[in-house]
Amino acid sequence: MSLTDIPWNHFDPINHFSTGQDSTSGLYPQHPHSSAFFGHGFAHLSNTLYHPSNSIYFNMNTLSTAEMERFQKLSNEFQADVQGPAVSAKQPSSAIAMEYANADPAFATKTSALAITHPLTRTMRGDGNCGWRAVAFGYFENLFNLQNSLQVHHELNRIRSLNVLLDQTGQQEHLYEIFVDATEDVFNQISQAIQSGIRDDSFLVNAFNSEYNADAILTHFRLLTSAWMKLNPHRYQAFLSMPIEQYCAARIDTVRTEIDEVGLQALVDGVIEDSGFAVEIMYLDRSEGEAVTPHVLTPARPIAGTICLLYRPGHYDLLYPAEPTVNMEPVVNYQYAMTSDYSPWDQQGALAFDMNSSLMTIPNLMMDPTFGMAPSPMPAAPPSPYRVSPPQEVYQSPVHASPPPMSIASPPPPPLRMSAPPPPMSSLPPRSTDGPQIRLNPLVMKPNLSHSLPVTTPFKNSPYNQAHFQNQDFEPIHWEPSDSRR
Amino acid sequence: MGSQKRIAKELAELVESPPEGILVKLADESNLYTWHIYMDGPEGSPYYNGKFLLNLTLPTEYPFKPPTVSFKTKIYHPNVTNDDKGSMCLGMLRADEWKPSSRIQAVLQFARQLLAEPMPDDAVEGRIAEQYKNDRKRYEEVAKEWTRKYAVDS
């Protein structure tokens, strides 16, 4: 389903972001269950039948059996015209917000907030395997990001040991071995990349875009999930409308059947969870709230990484939260130090910083990884003219961050951080799960700020801003000669 | 390539211990993707004593796409098209129902079982299906006659 086809036309530009700023405390409202507004698989049909511009509403009951059969046949044979790579490169999530700019305000608000909390995304091809693919790719990607050969080896052995599940459920090795081979090949590629110091993950993207191999990997994950479910029926049967064997045959063991909630939970329980990676779903739907609804599928505990899925009715993609990363940190510190007289965030000084027009107009300043890392153009710092704030007011550096080349005034980083990067696994700080994982500018989070500021700064130069010429409600400020004479 | 490895193993298994009434050969020794199947008509069915030749074609994407099965020997059956293609309609061979963990042996056994018990509700030949349901005697006569005519070496 192409999301741009969604015929919601309740465009209300005024409400877009004014409400979005109130989301500090309720950024992640805990909905026990996200209400996808369309049942899986009905989205396409519903679009056709209930399109607002369609004056005729079909009554399915009046169709004859023959017509129903014809529809069923068409539906069975329907092959969505899916294009694009199976797994895309990382892209800015703002593209998702643009897709929904003219859609229902709930979507527009949520996608705009999403672009801030999760600035990057990877799209999965919507061919029926997107959910499986997103989890499998996210798993390997997180493993690669740990840069720990030992861990890769450990995971390879763990996944290999799951073959026992297949044997226990009557699968035969000569039938499933090619699937296991394909998965093991990815582990080996990850090991090799880590050993040769390759940080670029395009080899993973390529592995998942090579159709035969990717099908084999996904079939492997499907078979493991299916076996896990059959061996643990008490955990899933109550959620299924048919016997578990039948469910697995129809929904899990097939080649292109989209994953559903039960299957996803089983995939996570049976295959992913013991890796130490968490799986989190961001539900993008029209439920209450100004941000996507998060749901963590794994029990809370210290985690080695998170596979973050974006769920839109009928489709999964991958998301990447705006965590402090190695390269962004120095940039932020640098900016912080640029303000000549800063006071605590919440006061006027912060405004001066945020509204610093010269900084805000530097394209991609916040994103440019080379900016902070490059030798600073500023001369080596004389004794600091700036007030040094206590460390807790400065953004917390992630422990694994490489030391920023701090040549300008700023508190000297704690000496510990100057040492070589610590081993990846053990030193990751446990993340709190009870709040946003990013450092939101308190200004952005402050409620009711919309009365004084038209939009949040990240949208200052976008058409969402009413002051932008492309905004629907844009009105140029007219200069009235009489005004100046008064 | 993965598909060849898997196909070779499945073929070896079928040649080593063939299921009852089924004999498998490569149509061309240099090509793993086209098989000849010799199938004996099951006892108790109107196809008994007949020897039917089937073609089994495997896609290069096997096992992610299903094999196709067709009767080269003419056969009077509700689930086999009554033309020179002899296409067979098997639910398990539809792309959306196919499972990569299924094996060819199961496909062949299912096909032979279909000779013993046609599935008129899933028919490709509606007329034969009607006859099978309403006039079983006549259906069996014709099926036997066709078997004698086309599937028995004279």
Image: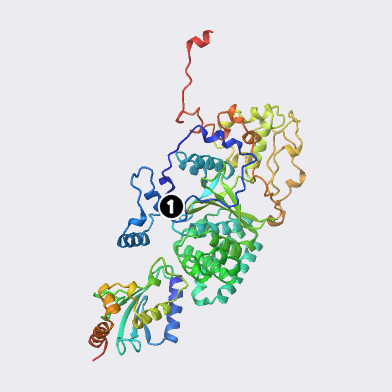
Chain letter for mark 1: A
Name the spot of residue B15 as percent of width and height, x first: 42, 85
Name the spot of residue A405 as percent of width and height, x first: 68, 40
Give whichever of A323, A19 is nearer the camera. A19
Visible in this render: residue A376?
yes
Residue position for label 1: A43
Residue for point 50% across, 40% down:
A108
Labels in figure, total:
1
Whether residue B93 is situated above or below residue A8 in the rendered picture: below
Give whichever of A201, A123 is nearer the camera. A123
Name the spot of residue A459 as percent of width and height, x first: 54, 34
Task: Tell which residue pokes out farthest to the front in this image.
Answer: A62
Whether residue B35 is situated above or below residue A353 in the rendered picture: below
Quarter of the image with the C terminus of chain A in it: top right
Whether residue B99 is situated above or below residue A337 in the rendered picture: below
Whether residue A441 is situated above or below residue B23 in the rendered picture: above
Task: Give the quarter of the image for residue A62.
Answer: bottom left
Q: Is disc 1 placed on a helix, strand or loop? A: helix
Give whichever of A258, A183 is nearer the camera. A258
Task: Give the quarter of the image for residue A224.
Answer: bottom right
Task: Tell which residue pokes out farthest to the top in this image.
Answer: A485
Residue for point 25% across, 75% down:
B82
* Amino acid marked by disc 1: Ala
Visible in this render: residue B77?
no
Sort mark 1 into few (<14), some (14-19) or many (20+) by Cα contacts within 10 Å: some
Task: Give the quarter of the image for residue A373.
Answer: top right
Is A7 left, or right, of A419 in this rendering? left
Is A314 left, or right, of B90 in this rendering? right
Name the spot of residue A449 as percent of width and height, x first: 61, 30
Task: Tell which residue pokes out farthest to the bottom in this image.
Answer: B154
